[in-house]
Amino acid sequence: MRKVYLDHSAAMPLLPAVREAMLPFLGDSFGNPLSLHDWGDPVREVMDTARERVAALVGADSPEEIIFTSSGTESNNFAVKGLAAALQNKGRHIVINVICVLGQVHESDYIPVASFLKPACFVCNPNL
């Protein structure tokens, strides 16, 4: 029987070109791109180039509009916080419907949002 992997939103194989581009940074060319020391410089340059390429791909006005995150949870929280800040004059309640994974609600999906918004807003998670 042929198996088909249908959970690409959770994990997916790397394209060979992506793997090849990442290999140097998984070995000797590592460093924190936000650091002030020399170890981060090569990584920062590669990330800046990637940011420019993504900005051009999506039609962003500038590369500074492109923000890389480390996970879906971080991305979701960033989006909700941005929306809450932009619409704070519209009201003080945010209802978040967290999609459950294997029947579990991740606190990491709503706790950071709740802590960011207090006391200005109330976060309600109807899945709890």
Image: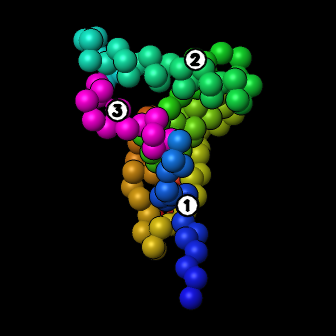
Q: Magenta span covers which residues?
A: 18-31
Q: Amino acid at mark 1?
A: His
Residue annotated with mark 3: 25
- Picture coordinates of residue 5, whole percent (x, y): 55, 71
Tag 1's secondary structure? loop
Q: Say which of 81 and 78 sits in front.
A: 78
Q: Say which of 60 and 98 sits in front.
A: 60
Decide which of tag 1 and tag 3 comes sooner along the chain: 1
The correct choice, above or below, for 100 with respect to 45 in the image is: below
Q: Residue at x 58, y 17 (%)?
A: 64
Query: Is the C-beta separation of discs 2 and 3 under 8 Å?
Result: no
Q: Amino acid at mark 3?
A: Phe
Residue annotated with mark 2: 64
Tag 3's secondary structure? helix
Few, some or many residues within 10 Å of mark 3 (<14, 14–19, 20+): few
Q: Residue at x 58, y 31 (%)?
A: 82
Q: Nearer the viewer, mark 2 or mark 3?
A: 3
Q: CA distance from mark 2 to mark 3?
A: 23 Å
- Badge number at residue 19: none
- Picture coordinates of residue 106, whole percent (x, y): 41, 59
Q: Say which of 55 and 72 sits in front.
A: 55
The correct choice, above or below, for 35 with respect to 82 in the image is: above
Q: CA distance from mark 1 to mark 3?
A: 24 Å
Tag 2's secondary structure? helix
Check residue 26 for magenta coloring. Answer: yes
- Badge number at residue 8: 1
